[in-house]
Image (cartoon, rainbow, N blue to C red):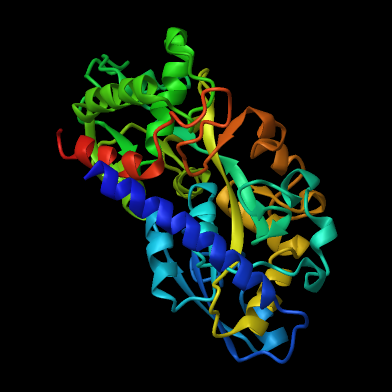
Amino acid sequence: MTKKLSVFFMLCLLLGAVSITAAQEGMMTAVGEGEGEVSIVSWAGYIERGETDENFDWVTDFEAATGCAVTNKVAATSDEMVALMNEGSFDLVTASGDASLRLIAGGRVQPINIDLIPSWSTVDERLQNAPWHTVDGVHYGVPYQWGSNVLMYNTDVFPEAPESWSVVFEEQTLSDGASNAGRVQAYDGPIHIADAALYLKYHNPDLGITDPYALDRDQFNAALDLLRQQRTLVARYWHDAFIQIDDFVNDGIVASGSWPFQVNLLQAESHPIGSTIPVEGATGWADTTMMHVNSQHPNCAYMWLEHSLNTKLQGDLAAWFGSVPSVLAACEGNELLGEGGCSTNGLDNFEKISFWRTPVANCGDDRGDVCVPYYEWLTSYIAVIGGR
């Protein structure tokens, strides 16, 4: 079975290389009249039209200016985004690094002609050629936002911010005298293996982990063992941001890995919630808006790609989600983000974050092809959640 899977994924990569060449030949050279609509797959909170809070709306003005009606499908995980883009009925996706290269290799997204994006030069130079959306010098998307996964916690239970991710990995008695068992959550996605690897990198240096996305067999197995231990503590594996919010409010959850988006919404409703990046560091995401290879509304899609770099949108979204803009000029003068908002959201942590990316067999160092590829991350994490 393993050999068959390996052959299958090699074929996917080979076919992806062919698809990349074919897609480049058909790259758009001009933006024409809009088709009247554009459909987007996004993370929760990324495409807002003021329905949750009227102050946060970057869709209405785009629709009025372009005549392109925006429809949005929220995806809870990167795997769901890949599945939706495989269906072929969406124009754009706000993909994280653990999905973007899969979409490129699978021929599901098309190269972006940055000459058709007038605001491209305003993008943070650290993101312009990032390896999660650039292959052989060809761009397959437009950077959107980036940030860190955080440890969200109940401040009634944790009067001081937890110093370590151990509160979600190791059984312990909390300050209220009760165990953390059944009161913590973990992310429902195989990329969570990297969080376990990052924890082990700090606490078990003998494993020799240098990159949480490039794990050899021993390192990978150690991360799985830690996740099996964590399973005895976890009340729910979350993937829906709003369900996680409800769990913290109504179901006694007191600590979990999370996104700043949930933290912001809970704090806005005056719930006792805090967040921190513990001593071990954190994984994170740098999201890129990518365009389906067979987009039915390519002109409207290109219009949105340009709009997505608008400084007001970038600043408002950073304030709403708790992220950092890909256009640094958005950090200044935005009423909703406020002075110092980008620093609060982690602007200075770029070099400290282990950004999500798709694990592959080649470790990217002198170990060669001994690292565990993504399909094994997927099957192994499903097994862990299932109690195996």
Drawn side of residue 346 relative to residue 4, left or right: right
Instruction: Tell me where residue 331 appears, x and y as whole percent.
Output: 77, 48
Task: Say which residue appears at 37% left-offset and 27% top-offset.
Answer: 156
Q: Tell me the quarter of the image containing the C terminus.
A: top left
Picture mark count:
0
Is 259 above or below relative to 119?
above
Drawn side of residue 164 relative to residue 59, left or right: left
The one nearer the camera, 23 or 294, is: 23
The one nearer the camera, 86 or 119, is: 86
Task: Say which residue appears at 27% left-offset and 14% top-offset.
Answer: 172
The one nearer the camera, 310 or 379, is: 379
Task: Say which residue appears at 34% left-offset and 54% top-offset.
Answer: 8
Q: Please indicate, yes or no, whether residue 320 appears anywhere in the rendered image.
A: yes
Q: Quadrant of residue 91?
A: bottom right
Instruction: Tell me where residue 4 appears, x and y as whole percent.
Output: 27, 49
Q: Please indicate, yes or no, whether residue 58 appears anywhere in the rendered image.
A: no
Is 144 above or below relative to 31?
above
Extreme-top residue of the structure: 206
Extreme-left residue of the structure: 387
Is 161 above or below relative to 337?
above
Instruction: Tell me where residue 188 appears, x and y as whole percent.
Output: 32, 44
Task: Say which residue appears at 68% left-offset and 34% top-offset.
Answer: 350
Drawn side of residue 245 relative to residue 369, left or right: left
Instruction: Tell me where residue 149 appears, x and y as whole percent.
Output: 50, 38
Q: Tell me the quarter of the image containing the N terminus.
A: top left
